[in-house]
Image (cartoon, grey):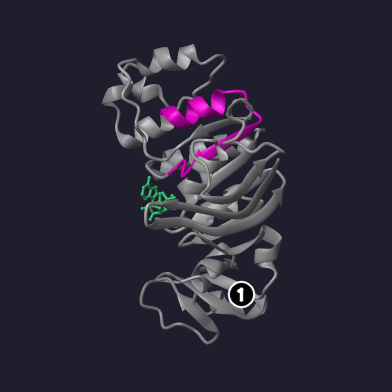
Amino acid sequence: MRVIAEDVYKSFGRKTALKGVRFDFEGKNLCLLGHNGSGKTTFLSIMTSLISPTRGKVIVNGVIPYKDRDKAVSMMAFQFEKPKFNLKVKVKDYMRYLDECDDMGLLDDVKNEYISSLSSGQTQMVQLLSVLCVKSEIKVLDEPLSHVDLANATKLGKVIMKDKADKVITTHIPEEAEWFGDYIVVLKEGEVRWKGTIDDLYREPIYEVFVRFNTTPPSGTIADFGNILLVRGEEEEMESMVKKGIAIGFKKAGVRKIYMESD
Ligand SMILES: Nc1ncnc2c1ncn2[C@@H]1O[C@H](COP(=O)(O)OP(=O)(O)OP(=O)(O)O)[C@@H](O)[C@H]1O
């Protein structure tokens, strides 16, 4: 999949949601990471043909979606974050209607319920599974796990990553971005604050060090996220902190580092 964003602006009245977004992605899984209101859904709405940019251009596999909606829709299946699915249809009938759809047992508890009576998380699972069941070149998923509890999020996340289609996924959770994206674009207030691969992220000698709350931050600490500290140093120093009981564990710092820098 290739997604090109050429200086994309989008305004809603006086509010400018995207301010010159630029990137050129070629690969399998693209993740847009950003705080609430950073412009993720606006970008997805343009790339799925639902709205046009005020200025600039988005090109998906050679197609400008909002200019060639038929081609765009035949290429992409999409799910948007806010579950709005007021259908008086039972879950089991809806899933049966979707050809060859296996709900992976995730909907067992709600099979006999009407979709209109489901909770936000349950509705999101139905929406997401129905998108994952559709045969489509590209799956566009807007915060796919935002309303789902941890156990179901883990299962659904695995289902998402098993899907062979190319994917564009948004999230505001750094760990999800690292799980889902081969390439991550960090948006803040409608601007690209960082873009790059997971390998780019892991290059620097900075670690996420897991500690109990109220631990005095060790030397080299560059940011404090409560029970996760960002610490600059060598791997041996991190190991030594674990041995001394100062830290519970550590991993190479990923997107959390960028998130901090963009605050
Ligand atoms: N139709 C609209 N009319 C007016 N303002 C809008 C509209 N859609 C989005 N916005 C504004 O544009 C900005 C970006 O919104 P967007 O929904 O793209 O953010 P987001 O990153 O998806 O946020 P979240 O993580 O909270 O879903 C926000 O300030 C929002 O209020």
Q: Is residue 193 left or right of residue 42?
A: right
Residue identifier under label 1: 206
Q: Residue 13, position in %: x, y?
A: 37, 52
As drawn, 28 above or below 178: above
Q: Looking at the image, how many numbered discs can be counted on the residues?
A: 1
In this view, which residue lies farthest toward the left?
117
- Identified at 52% across, 87% down, the residue is 219
Q: Where residue 136 sits in the image (x, y, percent)?
A: 63, 27
Furthest-bottom residue in this view: 219
Question: Which image quadrant is residue 123 in?
Answer: top left
Residue at 36% from the left image edge and 31% from the top image edge? 122
Q: Is mark 1 within 8 Å of ligand 1?
A: no
Left or right of 157 on screen, residue 216: left
Q: Nearer the viewer, residue 205 or 66?
A: 66
Q: How many neighbours does mark 1 have within 10 angstroms: few (below 14), some (14-19), or many (20 or more)?
A: many
- Magenta stretch? 126-145
Quadrant (top left/top right/bottom left/bottom right) for the N terminus = top right
Residue 85 drawn at (x, y percent):
35, 27
Q: Residue placed at 64% from the left, 27% from the top?
A: 71
- In magenta stretch: residue 1: no
Above or below — where is 237 with respect to 94? below
Q: Quadrant of residue 74?
A: top right
Element type at marker 1?
strand
Q: Position of residue 190 (x, y in %)?
A: 49, 59
- Look at label 1 and name its amino acid: Ile
Q: What residue do we see at 42% from left, 32% from top?
A: 125
